[in-house]
Image (cartoon, rainbow, N blue to C red):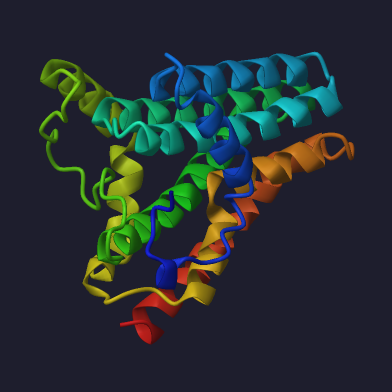
Protein backbone atom coordinates (compact mmCIF):
# COMPACT_ATOMS: atom_id res chain seq x y z
CA UNK A 1 0.00 0.00 0.00
CA UNK A 2 1.51 3.32 -1.09
CA UNK A 3 1.72 6.43 1.06
CA UNK A 4 0.89 8.52 -2.03
CA UNK A 5 -1.75 8.67 -4.74
CA UNK A 6 -0.56 7.21 -8.04
CA UNK A 7 -0.08 10.60 -9.72
CA UNK A 8 2.21 11.76 -6.87
CA UNK A 9 4.45 8.71 -6.78
CA UNK A 10 8.06 9.39 -7.72
CA UNK A 11 11.33 7.49 -8.03
CA UNK A 12 12.48 7.51 -4.42
CA UNK A 13 16.19 6.70 -4.35
CA UNK A 14 16.04 6.11 -0.61
CA UNK A 15 13.11 3.68 -0.77
CA UNK A 16 14.84 0.71 -2.41
CA UNK A 17 13.76 -1.42 0.55
CA UNK A 18 10.05 -1.07 -0.26
CA UNK A 19 9.66 -4.33 -2.28
CA UNK A 20 11.29 -6.32 0.53
CA UNK A 21 9.27 -4.38 3.11
CA UNK A 22 6.03 -5.27 1.35
CA UNK A 23 7.05 -8.92 1.12
CA UNK A 24 7.96 -9.05 4.81
CA UNK A 25 4.78 -7.21 5.83
CA UNK A 26 2.62 -9.59 3.79
CA UNK A 27 4.44 -12.54 5.33
CA UNK A 28 3.66 -11.23 8.82
CA UNK A 29 0.12 -10.04 8.11
CA UNK A 30 -1.58 -13.09 9.64
CA UNK A 31 0.90 -13.57 12.49
CA UNK A 32 1.11 -12.04 15.95
CA UNK A 33 4.01 -9.82 14.91
CA UNK A 34 3.17 -6.14 15.28
CA UNK A 35 4.65 -3.14 13.45
CA UNK A 36 6.52 -2.23 16.64
CA UNK A 37 8.08 -5.72 16.68
CA UNK A 38 9.41 -4.99 13.19
CA UNK A 39 10.73 -1.61 14.36
CA UNK A 40 12.61 -3.38 17.17
CA UNK A 41 14.02 -5.81 14.61
CA UNK A 42 15.46 -3.06 12.41
CA UNK A 43 16.88 -1.46 15.55
CA UNK A 44 18.69 -4.71 16.35
CA UNK A 45 20.06 -4.90 12.80
CA UNK A 46 21.39 -1.36 13.20
CA UNK A 47 23.14 -2.29 16.44
CA UNK A 48 24.77 -5.31 14.78
CA UNK A 49 25.99 -2.95 12.04
CA UNK A 50 27.57 -0.71 14.68
CA UNK A 51 29.35 -3.70 16.20
CA UNK A 52 30.63 -4.77 12.77
CA UNK A 53 31.97 -1.26 12.13
CA UNK A 54 33.84 -1.26 15.43
CA UNK A 55 35.33 -4.67 14.60
CA UNK A 56 36.10 -3.51 11.03
CA UNK A 57 33.99 -6.19 9.42
CA UNK A 58 33.25 -3.86 6.53
CA UNK A 59 31.17 -6.18 4.34
CA UNK A 60 29.06 -7.37 7.24
CA UNK A 61 28.64 -3.78 8.39
CA UNK A 62 27.37 -2.85 4.94
CA UNK A 63 25.10 -5.88 4.89
CA UNK A 64 23.44 -5.07 8.22
CA UNK A 65 23.14 -1.37 7.39
CA UNK A 66 21.24 -2.26 4.21
CA UNK A 67 19.24 -4.93 6.07
CA UNK A 68 18.23 -2.27 8.57
CA UNK A 69 16.88 -0.15 5.69
CA UNK A 70 15.04 -3.12 4.19
CA UNK A 71 13.34 -4.01 7.47
CA UNK A 72 12.63 -0.33 8.17
CA UNK A 73 10.35 -0.32 5.13
CA UNK A 74 8.18 -3.08 6.61
CA UNK A 75 6.80 -1.64 9.86
CA UNK A 76 4.66 1.01 8.19
CA UNK A 77 3.56 -1.45 5.52
CA UNK A 78 2.49 -3.93 8.21
CA UNK A 79 0.60 -1.20 10.08
CA UNK A 80 -1.35 -0.37 6.94
CA UNK A 81 -2.03 -4.03 6.12
CA UNK A 82 -3.30 -4.75 9.64
CA UNK A 83 -5.03 -1.35 9.77
CA UNK A 84 -3.22 -0.58 13.03
CA UNK A 85 -1.53 2.78 12.50
CA UNK A 86 -0.08 4.29 15.65
CA UNK A 87 1.73 7.42 16.67
CA UNK A 88 3.72 5.34 19.13
CA UNK A 89 5.18 3.32 16.26
CA UNK A 90 5.73 6.42 14.13
CA UNK A 91 7.73 8.18 16.87
CA UNK A 92 9.59 5.02 17.91
CA UNK A 93 10.71 4.49 14.31
CA UNK A 94 12.07 8.05 14.11
CA UNK A 95 13.77 7.90 17.53
CA UNK A 96 15.47 4.62 16.63
CA UNK A 97 16.67 6.18 13.36
CA UNK A 98 18.36 9.16 14.99
CA UNK A 99 20.04 7.13 17.72
CA UNK A 100 21.30 4.56 15.22
CA UNK A 101 22.59 7.37 12.98
CA UNK A 102 24.46 8.78 15.97
CA UNK A 103 25.94 5.41 16.90
CA UNK A 104 26.94 4.54 13.31
CA UNK A 105 28.66 7.88 12.77
CA UNK A 106 30.51 7.76 16.08
CA UNK A 107 31.59 4.17 15.42
CA UNK A 108 33.05 5.46 12.15
CA UNK A 109 34.63 8.32 14.11
CA UNK A 110 36.29 5.79 16.42
CA UNK A 111 37.70 3.50 13.75
CA UNK A 112 38.83 6.37 11.51
CA UNK A 113 40.29 8.34 14.41
CA UNK A 114 38.41 11.43 13.32
CA UNK A 115 37.94 14.35 15.67
CA UNK A 116 34.94 14.61 17.95
CA UNK A 117 33.84 17.86 16.34
CA UNK A 118 34.05 16.40 12.84
CA UNK A 119 31.68 13.68 14.01
CA UNK A 120 29.30 16.22 15.54
CA UNK A 121 29.29 18.24 12.32
CA UNK A 122 28.66 15.09 10.27
CA UNK A 123 25.80 14.07 12.57
CA UNK A 124 24.19 17.51 12.37
CA UNK A 125 24.64 17.49 8.60
CA UNK A 126 23.08 14.08 8.07
CA UNK A 127 20.13 15.00 10.27
CA UNK A 128 19.47 18.29 8.50
CA UNK A 129 19.61 16.48 5.16
CA UNK A 130 17.14 13.85 6.33
CA UNK A 131 14.89 16.47 7.87
CA UNK A 132 14.66 18.34 4.56
CA UNK A 133 13.63 15.14 2.79
CA UNK A 134 11.05 14.29 5.45
CA UNK A 135 9.67 17.86 5.48
CA UNK A 136 8.91 17.89 1.76
CA UNK A 137 7.80 14.26 1.71
CA UNK A 138 5.32 14.69 4.57
CA UNK A 139 3.91 17.82 2.92
CA UNK A 140 3.43 15.85 -0.30
CA UNK A 141 1.68 13.03 1.57
CA UNK A 142 -0.73 15.50 3.14
CA UNK A 143 -1.47 17.08 -0.25
CA UNK A 144 -1.86 13.73 -2.02
CA UNK A 145 -5.40 12.35 -2.21
CA UNK A 146 -5.60 9.48 0.25
CA UNK A 147 -1.98 9.97 1.30
CA UNK A 148 -0.71 8.71 4.64
CA UNK A 149 -1.12 11.49 7.21
CA UNK A 150 0.22 9.76 10.33
CA UNK A 151 3.29 12.01 10.22
CA UNK A 152 2.58 15.70 10.80
CA UNK A 153 4.09 18.63 8.93
CA UNK A 154 4.54 20.60 12.14
CA UNK A 155 4.91 18.67 15.40
CA UNK A 156 3.64 21.29 17.85
CA UNK A 157 1.71 19.08 20.26
CA UNK A 158 1.14 15.43 21.00
CA UNK A 159 -1.55 14.00 18.71
CA UNK A 160 -4.61 12.20 19.97
CA UNK A 161 -3.90 8.50 20.43
CA UNK A 162 -5.24 6.21 17.75
CA UNK A 163 -7.29 3.09 18.59
CA UNK A 164 -5.14 0.44 20.22
CA UNK A 165 -2.57 2.75 21.83
CA UNK A 166 -2.47 4.70 25.08
CA UNK A 167 -2.43 8.49 25.17
CA UNK A 168 0.22 8.45 27.93
CA UNK A 169 2.55 6.43 25.69
CA UNK A 170 1.96 8.77 22.75
CA UNK A 171 2.72 11.76 24.99
CA UNK A 172 6.01 10.24 26.17
CA UNK A 173 7.13 9.30 22.67
CA UNK A 174 6.16 12.75 21.38
CA UNK A 175 8.32 14.42 24.05
CA UNK A 176 11.29 12.24 23.17
CA UNK A 177 10.76 12.95 19.48
CA UNK A 178 10.64 16.73 20.00
CA UNK A 179 13.80 16.65 22.13
CA UNK A 180 15.88 14.79 19.54
CA UNK A 181 14.35 16.23 16.36
CA UNK A 182 12.91 19.60 17.40
CA UNK A 183 15.91 21.79 16.58
CA UNK A 184 16.47 20.13 13.20
CA UNK A 185 12.79 20.59 12.31
CA UNK A 186 12.85 24.25 13.31
CA UNK A 187 15.97 24.97 11.24
CA UNK A 188 14.55 23.41 8.07
CA UNK A 189 11.11 24.96 8.59
CA UNK A 190 12.72 28.40 9.01
CA UNK A 191 14.63 27.97 5.72
CA UNK A 192 11.45 27.22 3.77
CA UNK A 193 8.50 28.25 5.97
CA UNK A 194 5.95 28.45 3.14
CA UNK A 195 6.59 25.04 1.60
CA UNK A 196 3.36 23.67 3.09
CA UNK A 197 1.37 26.03 0.84
CA UNK A 198 2.41 24.41 -2.43
CA UNK A 199 -0.22 22.48 -4.36
CA UNK A 200 2.17 19.60 -4.95
CA UNK A 201 5.82 18.87 -5.69
CA UNK A 202 6.90 17.71 -9.18
CA UNK A 203 8.06 14.11 -9.28
CA UNK A 204 11.50 15.08 -10.60
CA UNK A 205 11.99 17.41 -7.64
CA UNK A 206 11.08 14.75 -5.08
CA UNK A 207 13.49 12.34 -6.76
CA UNK A 208 16.25 14.92 -6.28
CA UNK A 209 15.23 15.42 -2.66
CA UNK A 210 15.33 11.66 -2.09
CA UNK A 211 19.14 11.90 -2.34
CA UNK A 212 18.76 13.03 1.28
CA UNK A 213 16.49 10.17 2.33
CA UNK A 214 17.87 8.05 5.17
CA UNK A 215 17.84 4.90 3.06
CA UNK A 216 20.08 6.52 0.43
CA UNK A 217 22.39 8.00 3.08
CA UNK A 218 22.83 4.56 4.66
CA UNK A 219 23.37 2.99 1.24
CA UNK A 220 26.25 5.39 0.63
CA UNK A 221 27.82 4.42 3.97
CA UNK A 222 27.30 0.72 3.23
CA UNK A 223 29.14 1.16 -0.10
CA UNK A 224 31.96 3.34 1.22
CA UNK A 225 32.94 1.02 4.07
CA UNK A 226 33.92 -2.04 1.97
CA UNK A 227 35.68 0.27 -0.50
CA UNK A 228 38.08 1.33 2.26
CA UNK A 229 36.73 4.89 2.34
CA UNK A 230 35.89 4.93 6.05
CA UNK A 231 38.11 7.99 6.60
CA UNK A 232 36.08 9.94 4.01
CA UNK A 233 32.57 9.18 5.25
CA UNK A 234 32.30 11.97 7.82
CA UNK A 235 33.82 14.70 5.60
CA UNK A 236 31.63 13.52 2.72
CA UNK A 237 28.37 13.99 4.63
CA UNK A 238 29.47 17.42 5.82
CA UNK A 239 30.11 18.47 2.22
CA UNK A 240 26.95 16.69 1.03
CA UNK A 241 24.94 19.37 2.82
CA UNK A 242 25.70 21.77 -0.02
CA UNK A 243 22.63 20.38 -1.79
CA UNK A 244 20.44 22.02 0.88
CA UNK A 245 21.50 25.36 -0.59
CA UNK A 246 20.37 24.16 -4.02
CA UNK A 247 17.13 22.28 -3.27
CA UNK A 248 15.52 24.93 -1.08
CA UNK A 249 16.01 27.80 -3.60
CA UNK A 250 14.62 25.53 -6.35
CA UNK A 251 11.51 24.97 -4.26
CA UNK A 252 11.12 28.58 -3.19
CA UNK A 253 11.56 30.21 -6.59
CA UNK A 254 10.33 27.63 -9.07
CA UNK A 255 7.70 25.50 -7.32
CA UNK A 256 4.60 27.26 -6.04
Residue 20 in view: yes
Residue 187 pos. (x, y %): 32, 52
From what the image shows, is residue 212 above or below residue 178?
below
- 95 vs 71, left or right, is left
Q: Which residue is located at x 33 percent, y 58 percent?
A: 141
Q: Is residue 13 left or right of residue 88?
A: right
In this rendered view, identify the residue nearer to me: 95 or 160.
160
Looking at the figure, which quarter contains the C terminus? Answer: bottom left
Q: Quadrant of residue 214?
A: top right
Q: Nearer the viewer, residue 171 or 112?
A: 171
Q: Is residue 92 left or right of residue 59?
A: left
Place of residue 63 in the rendered image (x, y in percent of width and height, measured from the top left): 76, 29
Residue 211: image x %, image y %?
59, 58
In the picture shown, does residue 169 fall above or below 198?
Answer: above
Q: Residue at x 31, y 50 (%)?
A: 148
- The residue lying at 48 percent from left, 24 percent from top is 99
Image side of residue 24 versus residue 138, left or right: right
Amino acid sequence: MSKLASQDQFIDLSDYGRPFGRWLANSLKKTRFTPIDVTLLFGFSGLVAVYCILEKYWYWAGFFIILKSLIDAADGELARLKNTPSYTGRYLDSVFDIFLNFMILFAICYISQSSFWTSIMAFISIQLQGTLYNYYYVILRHKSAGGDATSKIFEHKAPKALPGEKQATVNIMFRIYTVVYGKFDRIIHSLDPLAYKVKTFPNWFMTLVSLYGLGFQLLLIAIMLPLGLENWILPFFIGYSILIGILIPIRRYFIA
